[in-house]
Amino acid sequence: MFDFLEGYDLLGAFWVTVQLTLLSAAGSLVWGTLLAAMRVGPVPLMRGFGTAYVNVVRNVPLTVIILFTSLGLNQTLGITLGADNFETINFRLAVLGLIAYTSAFVCEAIRSGINTVPVGQAEAARAIGLSFFQVLTLVVLPQAFRSVVGPLANVLIALTKNTTVAAAIGVAEAALLMKKMIENEAQLLLISAVFAFGFVCLTLPTGLILGWVGKKVAVKR
């Protein structure tokens, strides 16, 4: 029944998907946290930048962002991100595009967690002489992260599925292989079922594990 899988590197394609997900998740967490800090910070210019970035990026289709990284950054401006071959360049550009897009959602998730921290705690920290950066990193963010594990898990699951858009610029991940197999094989339903099962295997454990972690570390108020 599954003879049509012979000759195709199915595991290799899903490994590329996993790499895209992990690298983009790490970058999005860092950049999204910085954006959240800007949005709640005391500097009007930084608050304006954070707000504008999130509102603009969230309303731009991911496909447009991914295509811009390839057509705009690479082919027009010649940016290669330190790579010297086509596949590596497009892989790194796809990671950059996914980070730029996903970080906007990470920012809003973390900002919602920041809003759950009682204002009195931040005021007490400032009263004993802590700076804004110290209040944010020592008092607010540790509690905020504990309260948004669930929402961040949802963002990670969405990111895993969004990696399929990288196929638009030739990244050899699961969606590109699926497209190639559909064009070459007369097994549309089985091919679709195989790739759907593959993504379920990636996303379902993520949701279950992070959901359990979220309950364990949740702040009791």
Image: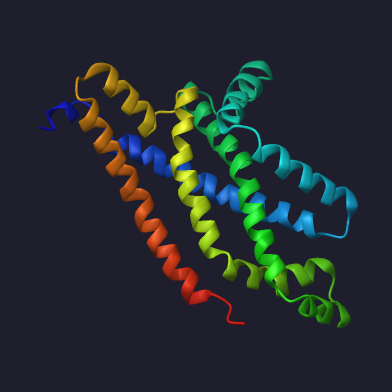
Viewed as shown, does residue 16 lie left or right of 76? left
Image quarter where the C terminus lies is bottom right
Residue 183's place in the image compared with 89, above or below, is above
| Residue at 88 percent of width and 48 percent of height | 45
| Residue at 31 percent of width and 49 percent of height | 201
Residue 179: quadrant of the picture = top left
| Residue at 78 percent of width and 55 percent of height | 39
Residue 64: quadrant of the picture = top right
Residue 98's place in the image compared with 129, above or below, is above
In this view, the residue in front, 19 or 109, is 109
Q: Position of residue 190 (x, y in %)?
A: 20, 32
| Residue at 21 percent of width and 20 percent of height | 185
Q: Position of residue 12 (x, y in %)?
A: 31, 36
Q: Position of residue 57 (x, y in %)?
A: 67, 38
Residue 175: quadrant of the picture = top left
Viewed as shown, does residue 24 lie left or right of 184? right
Residue 96's place in the image compared with 124, above or below, is above
Image quarter where the N terminus lies is top left
State how many labels appear.
0
In this view, the residue in front, 73 or 58, is 58
Viewed as shown, does residue 138 lie left or right of 151? right
Indicate how the structure is coloured in the image: rainbow
Q: Position of residue 91 (x, y in %)?
A: 49, 31
